[in-house]
Image: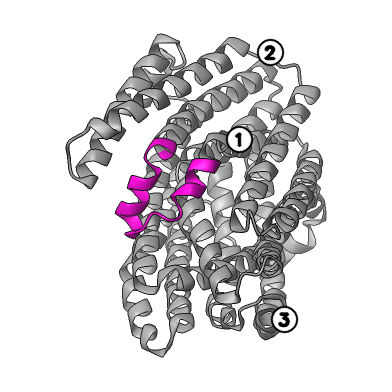
Amino acid sequence: MSKFLKGTMILIVAGLLTRILGFINRIVVARLIGEEGVGLYMMAVPTLVLAITITQFGLPVAISKLVAEAEAVGDRRKIKKILVVSLSITIVLSMIFFPALLAIAPILSNTLFTDARVYYPLVAIAPVVPIVALSSVLRGYFQGRQQMKPYAYSQLLEQAVRITLIAAFTTAFLPYGIEYAAAGAMVSAVVGEFVSLVYLFITFKRKKPIRIRYRFFAYVKEGKDTFVSLMRIAVPTLGSRMIGSVAWFFEPIVVAQSLALAGITASHATKQYGELTGYALPLLMLPSFITYALATSLVPAISEAAAQKQYRLIEYRLHQAVRLSLLAGGLSIVVLYVLAEEMMQLMYGANEAAIFVKVMAPFFIFYYLQGPLQAVLQALDLAKEAMTNSLIGAIVKTALIFWLSSQPSLGIMGAALAITVGIMVVTLLHAATIIKAISLSLYVKHYVAHFIVIVSVTTVGHWIVPLLPFSLLMKTIVAIAIMTFIYLALAQSFRLIEKDEFRQLFR
């Protein structure tokens, strides 16, 4: 089996297990603290992601790409320089942004957010910033060497620790108020990330590939060229992620202010935002573990191929990733669209947020394609173009949120529509950039076949589900099994699944 497929499969399995554990976490939190508590939790998350994005400085992708290139030519000294310089940058940035987040938490909660209770989750999550920043360097190193197991195991370990602690922490803080319970959920995330970092460090030390401490500062002084190489990739990648993180940071603020203009109270706006971002969006994003695995494996695989000037392999990997993303994403949107109400009722005991899933699911195929396309742009040194595309999408999304959510007839549904449009814009721009940059054949028949399969199985699903005489849980399981079987059978008949590829996965 090729390194690309093997690494992808490891990440897909780990991603599936991680997402399942993550959903258990969300279900526990939702059932303990309700929509309002989830709203407070989700309002704090974008600020956390923004702080982490700044601290990581786009280094994980840069490390993965440069390590893959150095590995391709056997340059061990360069790999050590990459690690040493990256760790130095990350440590310095962590020392700046961790206390900065603590300092601005009261300002954010009392001025920008319409709900001052967000302060407590913000403070609780702040310690995770330096932890995630350091672990991302080690993850980038393992990804660059196409060793996906340490990265996969660290994700599973982090979620396992969180699920062990989240109910205890949330319950312990709940008597003091919903805001403290949301902070307790954040604390469990911090502990989980710390245990994950410890595991990565122990794994790195056990393999003993590189002695980091030996002549550390000497390598820092000699690392000017490495620093420049890292920044050439990291800065545009940071810009692209910063745009997404800044847009997400302002998203709850713009939504809250827009809903206030529409005449919705602060507590009700928090509840609605929790339904959209805490219930509906995580369900829609659940299948992205497959496309995320593809994207993570694509960067080193295409970087290695580019370093060896294997351009036909680059095109093959791109088509392979797009086809697999469409295959997995297509099945996902069918299941989510047909069974939105049943799945919401099973997981959260309420299906008010199901309408968001039904409206957004058909267009989320663009979200499942976006990760692999962005990975290709980064691997081909087109990170600046990816950043520009992300900026355009963020501007469109934020403007639409303010315009649509402030309409009393739309309210929070306006935010859902705006998020969907923003995703579509970025994905289409990424695809156009790749087509312009490299000679690429378009297999229109494959895309038409995917569309036919998706529509056919959706139609069959709508017909079958009402006829199933089972309990809610059994009906959902049986419906998913039937739709999956029909979907895969049709995909095989249209030759959307390659037999050689399938055999490789199970060798």
Instruction: Find residue 449 and report its horizontal and vertical position in percent.
Output: 51, 14
Instruction: Find residue 298 and report its horizontal and vertical position in percent.
Output: 59, 34
As measured in the structure, the alpha-carbon distance from the residue carrying label 2 to the one carrying label 1 is 20 Å
Can you tell which of label 2 and label 1 is closer to the viewer?
Answer: 1
Place residue 420 in its image quadrant: top right
Q: Is 355 covered by the magenta stretch?
A: yes
Can you tell which of label 1 and label 3 is closer to the viewer?
Answer: 3
User: Height in image: 481 above or below 386?
Assistant: above
* Display colour scheme: one colour
Give 190 or 94, whichever is nearer the viewer: 190
The answer to whether the residues at label 1 and label 3 have Cβ atoms under 8 Å apart is: no
User: Height in image: 420 above or below 54?
Assistant: above
As measured in the structure, the alpha-carbon distance from the residue carrying label 2 to the one carrying label 3 is 51 Å
Identify residue for label 2: 441
Give 202 or 463, whichever is nearer the viewer: 463
User: Height in image: 289 above or below 458?
Assistant: below
Q: Quadrant of the N terminus?
A: top left
Q: Residue at x 61, y 79 (%)?
A: 115
- Residue 424 lies left or right of residue 125; in this view the side is right
Q: Quadrant of the C terminus?
A: top left
Magenta stretch: give its range.
336-359
Instruction: Find residue 433 and report its horizontal and vertical position in percent.
Output: 78, 30
As measured in the structure, the alpha-carbon distance from the residue carrying label 1 to the one carrying label 3 is 35 Å
Residue type at numbered disc 2: Ser
Query: What is the number of the mark on residue 366?
Result: 1
The residue positioned farthest toward the front in the image shown: 409
Instruction: Find residue 46 and report its horizontal and vertical position in percent.
Output: 62, 64
The answer to whether the residues at label 2 and label 1 have Cβ atoms under 8 Å apart is: no
Residue type at numbered disc 3: Thr
Sequence-wise, the earlier of marks 2 and 1 is 1
Residue at disc 3, secondary structure: helix
